[in-house]
Amino acid sequence: MIDDRTRQMIEWYLPNPPDPELEEGEYYYRQSTMKGEQVIKVRVTAIFPGEMHQPEEYEIYQIRSDGLRWVDVGWGDHCRGAFKSQLYDNKQDCRDQTHQWAEDWERLREIQKKEGLL
């Protein structure tokens, strides 16, 4: 049984179930481009440890029909990446940026599954 706070966090941060087409290590990422915001499918290829109260960062590559392409998330540095809160397992949630401040959203997703709240 989960407490009310955790249940509320799940409702706010994870309003939609995970998309079944994503494989292990794949996520959606909302990318800013000259054409505007677009949701792209990405694969995590490396994890960079956080420094001094900073969360881990994830090197991501866009999944394209012609292969993988590195995604610069705004740092301009191959040794920097996206935060977990910027990666989503549901395309609509990514568009809506439902958990942009929740680095631990995957833990909440596991609780949601375990409790049968999907």
Image (tube, grey):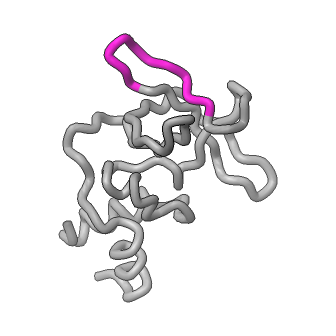
At 58% from the left edge and 38% from the top edge, which residue is drawn?
58
User: Is 22 situated above or below 10?
Assistant: above
In-front residue for pair 97/1 = 97
Left or right: 113 as drawn, with respect to 35: left
- Name, please, the residue furthest toward the front: 35
Q: Quadrant of residue 70?
A: top right
User: Is 1 situated above or below 56?
Assistant: below
Magenta stretch: residue 70 in it? yes
* Main secondary structure type of the part rendered in magenta: strand
- Name, please, the residue furthest toward the bottom: 4
In-front residue for pair 52/101 = 101
At 20% from the left edge and 44% from the top edge, which residue is drawn?
20
Q: Report x, y in % for residue 5.
A: 43, 85
Split into 4 quadrants, where in the image is the C terminus? bottom left
Left or right: 77 as drawn, with respect to 62: right
At 28% from the left edge and 82% from the top edge, which residue is drawn?
1
Q: Report x, y in % for residue 19.
A: 24, 47
Q: Report x, y in % for residue 38.
A: 43, 41
User: Is 3 situated above or below 79?
Assistant: below
Magenta stretch: residue 78 in it? no
- Name, please, the residue furthest toward the right: 52
In-front residue for pair 42/113 = 42
Left or right: 43 as drawn, with respect to 72: left
Q: Quadrant of residue 11?
A: bottom left
**Which range is magenta?**
63-72
